[in-house]
Image: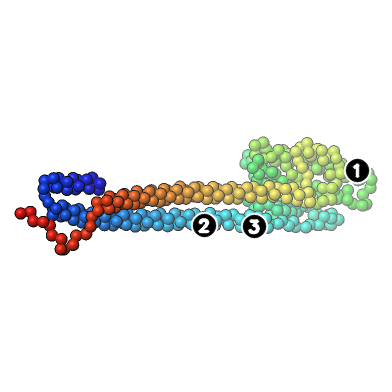
Amino acid sequence: MESVLLVVLGVIIVALFLGGGFYLLKTLLKSFEDSLSRSRMELRQNLQLTTDDLQKKLESIRTEVDQKLSLSVKQNFDSMTTVSKRLEELQNVTGQVVSLSQGVKDLSRILETPKLRGAMGEFQLAEMLREVLPEDSFEEQFLIDKKSKEQVDAVIKLKEGYLCIDSKFPLSNAKKIFDASTSDEELKLAQKAFAEDVKQMAASISEKYIIPDKTLDFAFMFIPTESVYYELMKNSDLHQYCLKKHVIPVSPNSFYAYLQAIAIGFRGLKIQNEAKKIEQALLKLKSDFQKFGVDFEKVGKHLKDAQNQYNNVEDRVAKFGTTIDKLGLEPQTPEAQPPSLN
């Protein structure tokens, strides 16, 4: 625009020097003023179009960013709500153990056969496992090694391997110990026979159900009644023998305590898994927020560029107006006639 002005001024000066006269000068100035007015109007229209287009683009970008951020935040909070509900369910889980009679006075009449005694022990063991542990954490009548075809009454599935539990009920000789009519001589023989029964059971469990790389290096021998278990624990040598065989005798009460400890471990593992899900959700939220920050920074840059462009155009228009004002141009009236050139 400044170069055009210089050219026009140059033409005016040449015209003056060539003697074109005042009329030619006024005509040229009028033409230049009209051209300048049209240019200024076109400049304003172009600037308005550019501003409107920029505002539309900024509004579109802002709407898209808001929609994506809202959707991402909603999905992440829905995921966190689901995880929170699951954690509450875990905290509300409580175990109740079926209370069975601990007396042995009637066992001699109820449990006459070894098969029935074994079934009772297996049933009680299974009920305790169902009451305390998650359903997918144990299995009944489990075949550890297909080659041996020996099924253990139950296993608890741990990360380190299977924890085997076998129910044993050495009641035959235990009844004589509990019988008040048994003489001292018979009592000693019954206690010795009871110890042999327990040793054979412990050795069998150790041999069949402790398998390297498949099971833990110890197993539980579940004794269904507290009185029989107490008789075993009174004999320290017999207890030590079981431990040497890596077999731990447990009664319903002591086994319940072990199960509670194991159940806490399972709950902790589930909480840990849920915590990982929460962490992943938070990391995704963080990533989405970082993307939003990048988009927001781009929007800010576009706004800054638009503002700088507007300021530059405004400065140029102001300078152009000042230049025009310096020319001292006045509107022409109809009465003013150019002098005749003849």
**What colour scheme was applied to this rendering of the protein?**
rainbow
| Residue 74 image label | 2
Q: For the view shown, which residue lies furthest in the right direction? A: 184
Q: Residue 20 location in percent, x, y?
A: 11, 50
**Mark toward the viewer: 1 or 3:** 3
- What is the x, y in percent for residue 82? 58, 56
Residue 319 visible in this rendered orientation of the protein = yes
Q: Residue at the spot x=64%, y=47% of the render? A: 269
- Establish if 337 lies above or below 322: below
Residue 293, horizontal then vertical, whole percent: 48, 49
The amino acid at mark 2 is Lys
Instruction: Check disc 3 and report its element: helix, strand or loop.
Output: helix
Q: Which element is circle 2 on?
A: helix
- Disc number at residue 188? 1
Q: Amino acid at mark 3?
A: Glu
Residue that numbered label 3 is attached to: 89
Residue drawn at point x = 86 percent, y = 42 percent: 235
